[in-house]
Image (cartoon, rainbow, N blue to C red):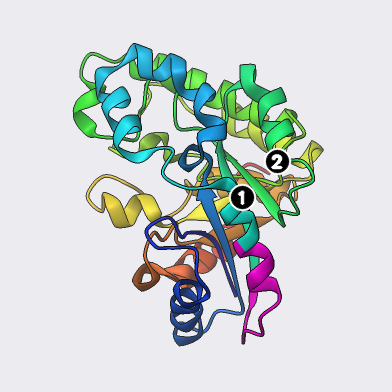
Amino acid sequence: MIDGHIHIERGNYTIDWIRQFVDRAVETGLDEIRLLEHNYMFPEFAPMYESVCAKSKFINDWFQRKACRKNYDDYLELVEKVRSEDFPIRIKFGLEVCYFKEYEELIVNLTKDKSFDFLLGSIHFVDGFGFDHKAELWDGINVDCIYCRYFEDSVLLARSGIFDGIGHPDSIGLFGHKPSFPLIEYYEGLASALAASNMYADQNSGAERRCPLTANLGMDKELIRILHRYNVPIISSSDAHTPSDVGYKIRELQELADINKCYNTSW
C-alpha cells in the first residue's frame, strides 16, 4: 500500500527526520511512501507567484511568511542520501508544483535532470484566486466561473506533458462550494487528458482532514468512476505535513476507489 503525497517541509533535511516518516509508515502497514516539497519552498520558483501575490494582500502575506524557506540543492542532496540508506519500505522523492500555464518552460527547466522519481502537478490558484487558503476568501466569488476555470486549467496541466500525476484533482470543493451545473463533462475532459498523458490521479485525504465538515474524503465518486473508465491510475495519499499524519485514512481511500471501480453508472 502506498501513501503517495507526503510533505517534509516542517523539518530539517536529515536522515533522522526522514526516518520519522518511515517509522510511522511501517506502523500503518505501508509498503511505499512518496515524499515531496511544495515548489514554492525554493527561491528558484518565486517568479511563478509574482502575479498572484500582486493580486491579493492575503496571498502576498502568506507567500512572504511561508515561501522560499528551503535550499533546492540541499533537497536534492537529501534525496541522494536517502537513496544510499537501507529502509524497510520503498521511498520515492518528488516535487509538488503549482501549475501556471505561462510558467511551463520555467517548471521544465527547474525540474529536468534532477533525478526526481515523480512530479505532481496541482492547481492551487485560479485566475490568481487562492481558493484553498481560507473560506472567507470565497466571499463575492462567482462559484460557477471558478469551477469552470479550475477544470479548464486542470486539463491544461494534464496536457502539458510535464507531470506524472495530478494532485487532489477536485480540491476546489474544500470549503463546500458547489457549482450550479453537473460536472460530468468536466470530469470526462480531465480523465481523457490524464489518460492521454499517462498520468495518475491523487486520491487525497488531506482536504477531509483539514475541513471534515465541508470536504469529501478523496475524490467525488463520479470522478473516480470516470477515471476508472479511462484507465487512469489512482494513488491514495494523506497529504501529510507531519509524520503523525502519514497513512491517514489510506485504506478508506483505497476502498472508495475500489468500490467505485466496480460500480460505474456512466457506462
Q: Secondary structure at mark 2?
A: helix
Residue depicted at x 67% and y 26%: 106
Residue 196 in the image, given as x and y percentages of width and height? 80, 37
Mark 2 and mark 1: span between their CA atoms? 12 Å
Q: Is residue 87 magenta?
A: yes
- Binning the other alpha carbons within 10 Å of mark 2 as few (below 14), some (14 to 19) or many (20 upward) gives some
Q: Which mark is residue 18?
A: none
Q: Quadrant of residue 159?
A: top right
Q: Quadrant of residue 206?
A: bottom left
Residue depicted at x 57% and y 39%: 97
Of 38 and 256, nearer the camera is 38
- Residue to which mark 1 is pinned: 73
Residue 167 in the image, given as x and y percentages of width and height? 55, 45
Residues rendered magenta in the picture: 78-90
Residue depicted at x 32% and y 46%: 215
Residue 224 in the image, given as x and y percentages of width and height? 57, 49
Of 84 and 258, nearer the camera is 84
- Residue to which mark 2 is pinned: 111
Residue 41, relative to residue 138: is it above or below? below
State which quarter of the image contains the C terminus: top right
The three-letter amino acid code for the residue at tag 1 is Asp
State which quarter of the image contains the N terminus: bottom right
Q: Is residue 186 magenta?
A: no
Q: Earlier in the sequence, mark 2 or mark 1?
A: 1
Of 165 and 72, nearer the camera is 72
Residue 106, relative to residue 162: is it above or below? above
Residue depicted at x 46% and y 42%: 41
